Amino acid sequence: MQFKSIFHKKKKYASIPTEKAKQEIPEGLVEKCGSCGKIYYEKEWTQQLKVCPNCGTHHRLTAYERIDALLDAESFIEWDQSMETTDPLKFPEYQEKLKKDQVKTGLKDAVVTGKGTINGYETAIVVMDPFFRMASMGAVVGEKIARALENAREEQLPMIIFTASGGARMQEGMISLMQMAKTSMAVDRFNRSGGCLVNVFTHPTTGGVTASFASIGDYHFAEPKALIGFAGRRIIEQTIREKLPDDFQTAEFQLEHGQVDKVVHRHELKALLTTVLDLHQPKGRDE
Amino acid sequence: MKQVLSFEKPIIELKEKIKELKGMAEENNLTLDDEINTMEQRLKRLEQEIYDHLSIWDQIQIARHPERPTSLDYIEQLFTDFIELHGDRLYRDDPAIITGIAKYKEVPVTVVAQQRGKNTKENLHRNFASPHPEGYRKAIRQMKLAEKFNRPIICFIDTKGAHPGKGAEERGQGEAIARNLMEMAHLTVPIIAVVIGEGGSGGALGIGLADHVHMLENATYSVISPEGAASILWKDATKAEEAAKSLKITAKDLKALGIIDEIIPEVKGGAHRDFDMQVAYLDTYIEKSFNYLTTIDRLTLPDLRWEKYKKIGEITE
């Protein structure tokens, strides 16, 4: 055995809980960072909001985890919880895929909408869930987001949208594409009523969602390293016949190219959103 | 050489035989009228048979036919005094999108169109009608001018999709399309969009949010190319025909789904077979929309447009 491999092995062992600790933790109570491999107790992992303290990777959150982490306890009122797709095209294998993700996530479709308070400030909120069909946008996602924007407009609430999406949902064909129009038009109506739209890009936000409501907010924040783009990396590489740099379409890349206002660590997001909401309180202008 | 589609082969072959027979008759001073007549009757039946039973794949081939009339062909015939206007005032002029002002039935209008090339050289110049962000920004600049001067907007859609490239991403392809959708939502002039060839996803929609959306009979409009869908769903691009069927991308399917307003009939076998006739068909439908939409109070147009798109997407609660 070479010296190098002995050293490597040692280093690897260092990040694993001791044998004693291992015996004390029942199965399922530890989480492993998929990026650097470091293992954490479930409790610490949750406290860290799934951001690895070792390598800084922001792992994906479910919609409800995001809401729990951000909104004041018991303040969330959900809208349109039971809305479901009708599989309008009777697309092959779609029903099975939906059922599977419904069981996996406990959601009817890929977005949760509603309102609540952040440190006492009232806001409407939309959170896309990347664990449900990669948060692709079909009729339900489009309709729920449009309705949430309409509700926020009527109730004169600001709106915070956590974007995540693989793009338009292929299995609903052109109906999915038209949700780009519907949601963008809803943003337009919300805008013209004076509403404040804060979009937070999370990993990954692509395709038809990037080309609709996600890109036309008043403020664009993004989580570190989140993938944000229109076309897929593979398709671009095939088209231009060259390899793209590693940081292509990351949050930092979009910051550099002017599409994002600020890249924000997940642990600092609540404080930032609180300040933004505070800066948009009407009282400041009235006095 | 003319491009022949596979399903057209029997027709072309029969036509050649008739031509041969006619030539032979003339050369040898023979009377073959009966034979020629019979064959011409057969040709008619064959054309009817083939063109009335086109498969979805045949239709896609027609929509992608290299000789299919392009936006500029229609613009030249439908409008007078067309002045092409270039550039987005931010970065450059995108030849994949044509914009300009013209007269339609003596009324000033704004024209926005995706433009394919007819040969390799033209296609390289036009980037195969796949726009960059600057194309969409040029389009919205012209549409805002249309609103300022109260000119109806007529859009021709014909693209495989927005360009998937490095520069396009760096300059905000997603933002450019999104902004167009948001701005088109509240324009207080009529917008008519016609899909004349391929309607490729967000790249098509980026100039296609309209009060009336029509499609030529053999045109397609899809969220993803059939080849792309097949390779994602079944890891097999050869299943494109199956994907095309499932995706519901034909004018007939999209009319049934309430996505488009009217199907504009095509000349038998495709628009390229009789361009003048096709222009006349197109003119009829554009004129009908034009006359109807120009009677509506300008300020109510955005609300009507919202009502139209709000309805799309069946759900249960």
Image: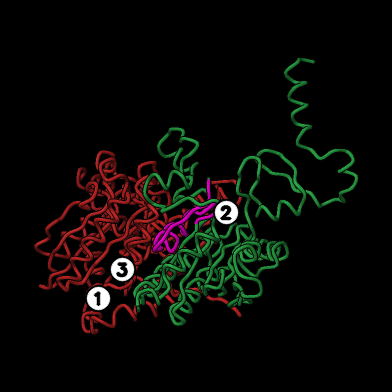
Chain colours: A green, B red
Which residue is at the front of the view, A166 or A198? A198
Spot occupied by residue A214 in the image (x, y as percentages of width and height): 45, 60
Tag 1: residue type? Thr
Residue at which label 3 appears: B184
- Mark 2 burial class by Cα count in 10 Å: few <14, some 14-19, many 20+: many
Q: Secondary structure at mark 1?
A: loop
User: Given the image, what chain letter belongs to the residue carrying mark 1?
Assistant: B
Which residue is at the front of the view, B48 or B200? B200
Instruction: Give the total of numbered labels.
Output: 3
User: Given the image, what chain letter belongs to the residue carrying mark 3?
Assistant: B
Rendered view: B97 above or below B207: above
Which residue is at the front of the view, A68 or A153? A68
Residue at which label 2 appears: A266
Is A111 on the left-hand or right-hand side of B188? Answer: right
Tag 2: residue type? Arg
Instruction: Say if residue B41 shows up in the picture.
Output: no
Tag 3: residue type? Met
Residue at which label 1 appears: B188
Examine the image and state in which quarter residue A192 appears: bottom left
- Mark 1 burial class by Cα count in 10 Å: few <14, some 14-19, many 20+: many
Per the rendered image, the range of residues in magenta is A201-224
